[in-house]
Image: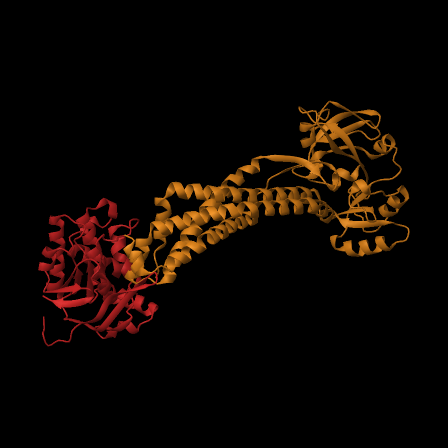
Amino acid sequence: MGIPYSYSFRNLWTRRLTTLLTASGMGLVVFVFAATLMLAEGLQQTLVQTGSPDNVVVLRKSANSEVQSGVERAQAALLESQPEVAIGPDGRPLLAKELVVLINLRKRGGNKPANVVIRGVSAASLQLRPAIGLKVGRMPRPGSVEVIAGESLARRFKGCGLGETLRFGMRDWRVVGVFDAGSTGFSSEIWGDADQMMQAFRRQVYSSVIFRLKDTNAFDAYKARVEGDPRLTVEAKRETRYYLDQSEAMSRFLRILGLVLTVVFSIGAVIGATITMYAAVANRVTEIGTLRALGFQRKSILLAFVMEALLLGLCGGLLGVGAASFMQLITISTMNWASFSELAFSFTLTFGILWKSLLFSLVMGFIGGALPAVRASRMNIVEALRAT
Amino acid sequence: MDAAAPPIVVIRNLTKSYRRGSQSIQVLSGINFDIARGEFVALMGPSGSGKSTLLNLIAGIDSADEGSIRIGEQEITRLSERELAHWRAGHVGFIFQFYNLIPVLTAYENVELPLLLTTLKRRERREHVEAVLSVVGLADRMDHYPSQLSGGQQQRVAIARAIVTDPEILVADEPTGDLDRVSAEEILQLMDRLVREFKKTVIMVTHDPRAAEKAHVIRHLEKGELSVT
C-alpha cells in the first residue's frame, strides 16, 4: 500500500485558498472548453432534430441547401409519382413541394436586420413534420396572403407576432398563427402557402421536394434510381443527413475555435498548476524526506503528488463544468452559414461533453503536477530531512 | 544484555566524504564500531563531527564511500536503494529532533503510516496503533492533529510511529533538542523504558549531557573518528 489518498486530499484542503485560485484558473479553461463543445452540440442537435429519418429531401443536384436549390414543376410532378412516396390518410401522397426564400427582417428592440427563412408550404408539410404544432391562432388558408411564424421568430422579430403584419414580396402578409417547432430550425421560419409565395417572389421553381418514405429501407434504391434518371437533375438525401450536413461546417468551426482557445488558455492554467505544485513540494521537503526514511519508495511519493495534482485538476474541472452547465439556460441566436438565415439554439450539455471536460481537466492537472512530482520523488533523503 | 550475544550493529572501516563544490570533505574515516543488542548508545561530539552522518548510515538513508555496516543479519551497504527502503520499513524506527509528523494526518494516521508498508489488514493495523499509542500514553489523543499537541506529545507520537513496526533498532537524532526540560525528561524515560522493557536497541545523537546520561554507552566523535567513554 502506498501513501493514503487522504494525504493528498488533505494537503489540498489545508491550502484551500491556493487550491481554489489554481482550480479556478483551470476551471475557466474547462468552462471555455465545455461551453464551445456545448454550443457546437446545441447547434448540431437543433439542426439534426429538425429532420426526420423517414423523410427524404430532394434538391437540385450539387445544391448544398434549399436556398441554392431549384426543382422544376415538371420534375416535382415526376417525383410525386414515384412508388416509394407514402400515402397519407386522405389518400394523397405525403409529399410537399416547398419554396425557400430568404428575406430581411428587423429584430425587436435593436432594430437590427437579419435574414429569415420564408417557407412556402403545401398541405402535407405539417404532416411530414409531426413535431411541429400550432401554438396559437390557425393555419393560413390556401390561396390567402396569410402566414404563420415560428415561436422563436415571433418573439424576436418585428411584425412576426400573432395578428401583426409583415411586408415582403410586395404584399402585406398577416400572421394568423404561431407554431411551436421545439428546438428545431423550423422555429426560426415563417410559413405560408407555397403557390402564393411563388407568385409573390416571381419564382417558377420549387426549392425542394420533401416526402415520407413508404418503407424507410427503400431509400438507397430510390436514391440510385432518381439520381440516375436522365429526366431529373436532382439529389436525394435523408432529411436527418441533410440537416446534419448543414450543421457540420458551423459546428466544426465552433469545435476548432474552442479547441484552439482552450489549448492556448490551458498553457496558462498548466503553468499555474505547476507553480502551485512546485510550491507544495517546496513546503513539504521535510515531509517527503520523512516518508522516504520510513520506507516509502520513490514511486509512492511520485504517486502522492500526481494524485494531488489530479485532484486539483478535478476541482478545476468540476468548477468549470458546473459553471458551463448554467449556460444551458441561455439561448443563442446566430446566422446559420449553410442557409444564411437566423437560427436559435441553446448550449447543450451531454454526458460526452461532461467526461471530455473532466478528462481535459485531469490531463491539465497531470501535466501541471508531473514535473513537481518527479522532483519530489527524486529528493535525496538526507538533504530533505536537513531542510527542517 | 547478554555479553555473549553477537552485536546487532557491526561497522567496519566506514568512510564517508561529501563534496562541497570542488572540495571533498572527509566526514568519517575508517570507523569501526559494534553495538550490542538491547544497548542504548549515545553519540556525542561537536557540530560537524560526523555523528548525524554515522546515524544516517546506520539507518540506511545515506550511502557510505567505503566499509561495511551489518545490522542483524543484513549487510545494508550492499542493498540497492529500493531494497534499502524496504529494509528500513521493517527494521529501523526514526525519532527526529522536530518530530517530523505529517501535519495533515492525525496522531493515529501518523503512527499507522509505517504499517501501510506491511501486509497487515486494517483491523490488525488498528490494534498495533492503539497498542503503541497506549505505550506512549496518548491513547486518548489519537484523533488529534499534530498542531493540537504539545511538543512533548508530538515527540511521543513520533516514538509510537518509530516502534509500531517493532523494529530492531531505533535511531534518534537530537530527540530532546526541541523540548523543554520536563518534556525532555519524559521522552528520555520513555526511551529508557523501550530499551529495558521492549529490548530495543537505541542509537541516539545528542548534544545534551543529561540525555546522554541515560545511555549505557557514550561514544564521542571528533573529526570523523570515534572514542569510547
Q: Residue furthest front?
A: B22
- Comparing B229 with B192, the one in front is B229
Q: State the image coordinates of residue A68 (x, y, percent, origin top left).
A: 81, 42
Residue B164 visible here = no
Looking at the picture, the colour scheme in use is: by chain
Which of the image's four quarters has the N terminus of chain A? Answer: bottom left
The shade of chain A is: orange
In the drawing, does residue A355 fall left or right of residue B73? right
Q: Position of residue A133 (x, y in %)?
A: 69, 35
Using the rendered view, name the quadrant where residue A71 is placed.
top right
In this rendered view, identify the residue nearer to me: A348 or B164.
Answer: B164
Q: Is residue A156 above or below residue A251?
A: above
- In this rendering, position of residue A207 left or right of residue A162: right
User: Is residue A172 depicted above or below B180 in this figure?
Assistant: above
In this picture, residue A155 sits left or right of residue B99: right
Considering depth in this image, is B114 or B59 the residue closer to the camera?
A: B59
What color does chain B have in the rendering? red
Q: Is residue A183 left or right of residue B49?
A: right
Residue A153: quadrant of the picture:
top right
Residue sitting nearer the eye, B23 or A386: B23
Residue A39 in view (yes/no):
yes
Residue A37 x/y as whole percent: 59, 45
Image height of B88 relative to A163, above or below: below
What residue sits 29% from the left and 70% below the top? B65
Whole-percent x, y for residue B69 in the image: 23, 72
